[in-house]
Image: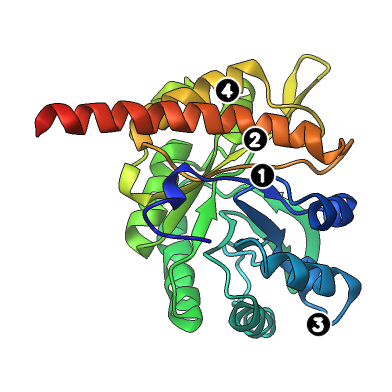
Amino acid sequence: MFTQSGVASWVGLGLRADHYDSILKSDPPIDWFEAITENYFVIDSLPWRHLMQIKERWPVTLHGVAMSIGSADSLNWKYLHQLKAIIKRIKPLWVSDHLCWSSVRRAYLHDLLPLPHTEHVVRHVAERVRQVQDFLEQKILLENLSSYIAYSASTMTEWEFLTAVAEEADCLLLLDINNIYVNSNNHGFDPYDYINAIPPERVRQFHLAGCQPNHEVYMIDTHDAAVKELVWKLYCVALKRFGPVPTLIERDADIPPLPELVAELNKARHFLRQVCTQKKQVYSGLV
């Protein structure tokens, strides 16, 4: 069961329909599951019933893809009321979504689109985040995106923008290590500069995932492969800066059998335990 003292060393898995039966039958060594929020808006549907069974045995977090927190539209209060209703029933450890826009005039584009990195957009997004947090009565986590375009209007780096939104909105961050790697390839920055600029006190969770090159021009965040070795290397650097942050692996296509993903989780668990051990040794030396 979840305890605040033990959550830092947790490893989790994105909950996918392919694994419902395996999870419930095999009792895998997974510390928590992250459910895609919108998949469970229909109460008493088959996905909902599976989630209810799983949440009785494992902690769950909610990860949304449709809040569209950066949109120029007004906030979608119908969506937020649905979200608050399932939060009350599921009681997730925390709730996250993406720092993006994905709708215009209430037409949803089914994609997570990047925002211009400007002070004006920081203020716009931060105000909306504060309204959402007040309504949900809790802080939310915002995730950094993978992206394939940049705006000529941007006046700050991606990491400066992400930090500014988190600070002004007083929200938390879900730092996707793979997305940092993807964007460093696509936009030509040093991923270690990104890691070293994010305030550790804002980071609540990490994501790890697989990606693919596309014609050797862009790196695509496909979530259809194992985590790349360079992403594991970046993850280890992130652990040294941020400490043992709860870490989750996402897989959305070419989904392998559950034991294969558990093996990847065990790799993350190994690195997390190394960080925990090192911190204990440092603390012991100070006593």
Mark 2 lies on residue: 265
Q: Nearer the viewer, mark 1 or mark 4?
A: 1
Q: Position of residue 93 (x, y in %)?
A: 52, 65
Of 251 and 153, the residue lying toward us: 251
Q: Residue at x 43, y 68 (%)?
A: 139
Numbered badge on residue 43 = 3
Q: Earlier in the sequence, mark 4 or mark 2?
A: 4
Q: Position of residue 15 (x, y in %)?
A: 75, 54
Q: Report if the CB atoms under discs 1 and 2 are less than 8 Å apart.
A: yes
Q: Report if the CB atoms under discs 3 and 2 are less than 8 Å apart.
A: no
Instruction: Tell me which amino acid carries mark 2.
Output: Leu
Q: Report if the CB atoms under discs 3 and 4 are less than 8 Å apart.
A: no
Q: CA distance from mark 1 to mark 4?
A: 21 Å
Mark 4 lies on residue: 232
Q: Secondary structure at mark 1?
A: loop
Mark 1 lies on residue: 29
Q: Nearer the viewer, mark 4 or mark 2?
A: 2
Instruction: Tell me which amino acid carries mark 4.
Output: Trp
Of 223 and 276, the residue lying toward us: 276
Q: CA distance from mark 4 to mark 2?
A: 12 Å
Q: Position of residue 157 (x, y in %)?
A: 44, 35
